[in-house]
């Protein structure tokens, strides 16, 4: 099966782009990155793309339709099959999103549908949740919404602040995004009734508690 041709949209640092570049360096990985698009010329991720020999293109965001038209032309020219949003900070034109229905994915640093939008790690800490994490989902016109492909759970800790929690989630994002893109590129992922079904994959068996049980002692033994 030919490798799926991926276009990655970024706005900044590009560490998820780097994780995808690293995954694609394996010839057995079912996708290759053929385009990197940034709405900001100063995005650090553009240098990562260049270092990997991938042509990066800056498309300035004058308006949603204008950005969409330029992006669409580039994606066609590079024969892109799948678009990956990786820290892309603009809301995309709804018609463009519809044109890439089930062919465009995003990573968001929370367990969606909790905490969409800006500063999800800060939102998670403010809500006092014991777990947050990250989500890869198909993109829909509503921000940070769409059928969920994969999620990873990251426990919050009593001494967390936004920076610490963000860093721990980001480390897991770099594992989750390449996995999710692999599953999509292998053709295992389909959307039915607004939900994702994945062929030949399974969920972990274990449950994780936070706070954790004392080692070797069931929680019930500590009561009373
Ligand atoms: C990541 O946390 C991603 O989930 C969110 O924006 C951040 C981008 O980081 N959408 P990077 O540019 O990939 O380093």
Image (cartoon, rainbow, N blue to C red):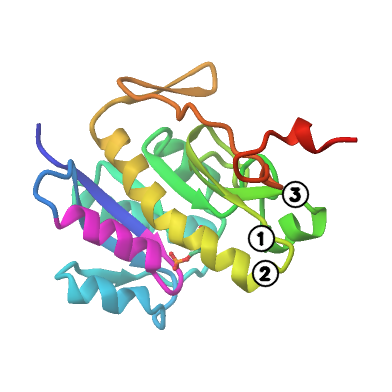
Residue neighbourhood size for the residue with mark 3, other residues' Cα within 10 Å, grouped as few (<14), some (14–19), many (≥20): few
- Asked whether 195 or 90 is in front, the reply is 195
- For label 1, the residue is 121
Labels 2 and 3: the sequence-earlier one: 3
Farthest-out residue, top? 193
Q: Quadrant of the N terminus?
A: top left
Q: In the rendered image of this protein, does residue 109 appear above or below residue 204?
A: below
- Horizontal and vertical percent position of residue 97: 47, 42
Q: Which residues are magenta?
A: 9-25
Q: Quadrant of the C terminus?
A: top right
Q: Which residue occupies 72% across, 49% down?
A: 130
Left or right, residue 123 beside residue 40: right
Q: CA distance from mark 2 to mark 3?
A: 13 Å
Labels 1 and 2: the sequence-earlier one: 1
Circle 3 SS class: loop
- Horizontal and vertical percent position of residue 182: 27, 40
Badge number at residue 129? 3
Q: Which residue occupies 26% across, 27% down?
A: 187
- Horizontal and vertical percent position of residue 54: 18, 67
Left or right, residue 92 beside residue 45: right
Badge number at residue 22? none
Cβ of mark 1 under 8 Å from ligand 1: the answer is: no
Circle 1 SS class: helix
Residue neighbourhood size for the residue with mark 1, other residues' Cα within 10 Å, grouped as few (<14), some (14–19), many (≥20): many
Cβ of mark 3 under 8 Å from ligand 1: the answer is: no
Left or right, residue 155 beside residue 33: right
- For label 2, the residue is 162
């Amino acid at each position: 099966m030919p490798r799926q041709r991926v276009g990655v949209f970024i706005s900044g640092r590009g560490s998820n782009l780097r994780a995808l570049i690293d995954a694609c360096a394996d010839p057995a990985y079912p996708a290759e990155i053929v385009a990197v698009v940034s709405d900001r010329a100063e995005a650090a991720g553009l240098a990562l793309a260049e270092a990997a020999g991938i042509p990066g293109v800056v498309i300035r965001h004058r308006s949603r339709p204008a950005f969409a038209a330029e992006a669409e032309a580039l994606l066609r020219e590079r024969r892109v099959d799948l678009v990956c949003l990786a820290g892309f900070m603009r809301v995309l034109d709804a018609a463009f999103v519809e044109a890439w229905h089930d062919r465009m994915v995003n990573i968001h640093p929370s367990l969606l549908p909790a905490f969409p939008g800006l500063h999800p790690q800060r939102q998670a800490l403010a809500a006092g949740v014991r777990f947050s994490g990250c989500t890869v989902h198909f993109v829909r016109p509503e921000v940070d919404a769409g059928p969920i492909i994969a999620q990873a759970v990251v426990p919050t800790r009593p001494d967390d602040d936004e920076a610490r929690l963000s860093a721990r989630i980001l480390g897991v994002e770099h594992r989750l995004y390449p996995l999710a893109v692999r599953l999509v590129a292998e053709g295992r992922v389909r959307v039915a009734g607004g939900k994702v079904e994945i062929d030949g994959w399974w969920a972990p068996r274990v449950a994780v508690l936070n706070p954790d049980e004392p080692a070797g002692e069931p929680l019930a033994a500590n009561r009373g």
